[in-house]
Structures are given as structure tokens and as C-alpha cells.
Amino acid sequence: MNRLIYKSRCTKEIDWDFVKEISNKSYENNSLVDVTGVLLASRSHFLQVLEGRFEDVNAVFRRIARDDRHTEMTLIAFNTVDARLFSEWGMRGIGTFNLNAKIEAELIKIYGDEEGGVRFPLEEWKALSLFQDIKMIGQLPDWKT
């Protein structure tokens, strides 16, 4: 089992419809190869975790890297792991701009500010902590159409 984490800058401002569109298509594609994960989006950046077999995660990441909807891609981690953290999500999309203002303000206190939103960290442990903090909120918007 492998886990890949990357951060990138979107080429346009991100909104909830865009996150849902990407998440729904990713869910369809990734379920065919048993890749799970989560896509976190601010108004300007993506932070994504992909989990699955090495070959499948690598193929999905290569496809993502060719997508012209983002630039400045940074590979944060690509490791062998014992178990999935996001096994229940085929590809869950979360917009930090859709969290309530109080939660977003708390996340900014912890992780910092980047272009008016939550800063997505470049350290693996910190990125996973951010995902776990958001996962613990438990009141995430519906992401499937």
C-alpha cells in the first residue's frame, strides 16, 4: 500500500462547483483502480492524498501532473504505508472555503494564511495533521452530485 501527497496552485480561482466536478470525476476514475484519498482545495491551491497500489497511485499522479488546471506542483511524499487513512473515500473533495468562518479561522491559526485562506503545508506530517483536523470536524459539505 502506498500514499502520495502533493500540493499545487490552481490556474483559476477555485469554487465549490469546481471541487465537486473534479471530485466526482476522480471518484469514478479512481474506483476503477482502487485508489482512494482526499482533495483539499483553498481558493488558490490543492492539497491531495492518493492511496493504493504503487502502480495505480503512480498512474493517477502522472495523469494529474499533466492536467493544465494547475501549476507549481510539489510532491510532498510518496511512501509505503501499512494502511489507508482515507479508505472510506473514493476521492473526497473538501473546500476549506466551505468550512464555517470560525473553523477556518482556527485552521489558519494552526497552519497559517496563504492568499486569504488556510496555508497547505509542505511537510508530510503537517499535511496529514491538517487532513485529520478537517476530518474530525465531521460537518463537511456533501460532495457528490
Image: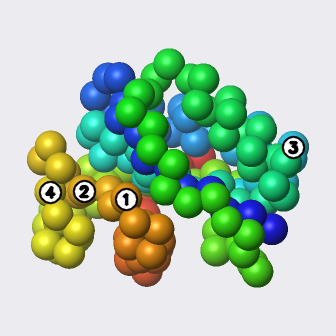
Disc nearest the viewer among 3 and 4: 4
Residue type at mark 2 is Arg
| Residue at numbered disc 2 | 119
| Relative to 54, residue 83 above or below | below
Front position in the image: 101 or 51? 51
Local packing at callout 4 (Cα closer than 10 Å; few below 14, some 14-19, many 20+) is some
Q: Which residue is mark 4?
A: 113
Residues at circles 2 and 4 in contact by the CB criterion of under 8 Å = yes
Q: Nearer the viewer, mark 2 or mark 1?
A: 1
Q: Earlier in the sequence, mark 2 or mark 3?
A: 3
- Residue type beneath disc 4: Asp
Q: Callout 3 environment at 10 Å: few (<14), some (14 to 19), or many (20+)?
A: few
For badge 1, the amino acid type reads Leu
Tell me if 107 is positioned left or right of 87 in this view: left
Q: Nearer the viewer, mark 3 or mark 1?
A: 1
- First along the sequence among labels 2 and 4: 4
The residue identified by callout 3 is 32
Q: Which residue is mark 1?
A: 122
Along the line of sight, the residue nearer the viewer: 126 or 30: 126
Residue 114: percent from the left, percent from the top?
17, 50
Q: Residue at x 15, y 43 (%)?
A: 115
Residue 110: assigned label? none
Mark 3 or mark 1, which has the lower sequence index?
Answer: 3
